[in-house]
Amino acid sequence: MIGSDILTEHHLTPRGWEAGNLPMDRVETWTRRGFEDLDYAREEVHWHCEWASPDVTRAHRDALRVKHDHFMWKSVRRRRLIVSIGAPL
């Protein structure tokens, strides 16, 4: 049985990750779906890339993602958590 199921949108910028309004300098937009599986007492988080700036090279976007990767993984230290990160566009 699924408990909460929350979908949020996050934008990667040169400053890091931002939620909410679209920043003018975003290079990627990702959705984060987090839900609780009450039957197995675990939480799942799935990241999916929805958009990538055609004006920014893949290498530059990869470097920004690596620089700010703590955001996607920050909750991994919790037990009973499954995190999956899809491939960038």
Image (cartoon, grey):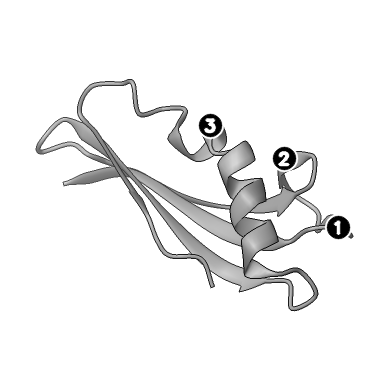
Q: From the viewer's perspective, is residue 23 above or below residue 67?
A: below
Q: Earlier in the sequence, mark 2 or mark 1?
A: 2
The answer for how far apart the CA atoms under marks 2 and 3 are is: 10 Å
Residue type at mark 3 is: His
Q: Label 1 neighbourhood size at 10 Å, few (<14), some (14-19), many (20+)?
A: few
The answer for how far apart the CA atoms under marks 3 and 1 are is: 20 Å
Instruction: Give the side of residue 24 with respect to residue 38, left or right.
Output: right
Q: Quadrant of residue 40?
A: top left
Q: Which residue is mark 2?
A: 16
Instruction: Give the side of residue 59 with respect to residue 84, left or right.
Output: right
Q: Quadrant of residue 15?
A: top right
Identify which residue is drawn at 86% across, 57% down: 25
Residue type at mark 2 is: Gly
Contact check, label 2 and label 3, Cβ < 8 Å: no
Closer-to-camera residue (19/49): 49
Instruction: Give the side of residue 59 with respect to residue 15, left or right.
Output: left
Contact check, label 3 and label 1, Cβ < 8 Å: no
Residue type at mark 1 is: Asp
Q: Which residue is mark 3?
A: 70
Closer-to-camera residue (52/62): 62
**Numbered tag placed on residue 65 in the rendering:** none
Identify which residue is drawn at 63% across, 62% down: 59
Q: Which residue is mark 1?
A: 25
Q: Secondary structure at mark 1?
A: loop
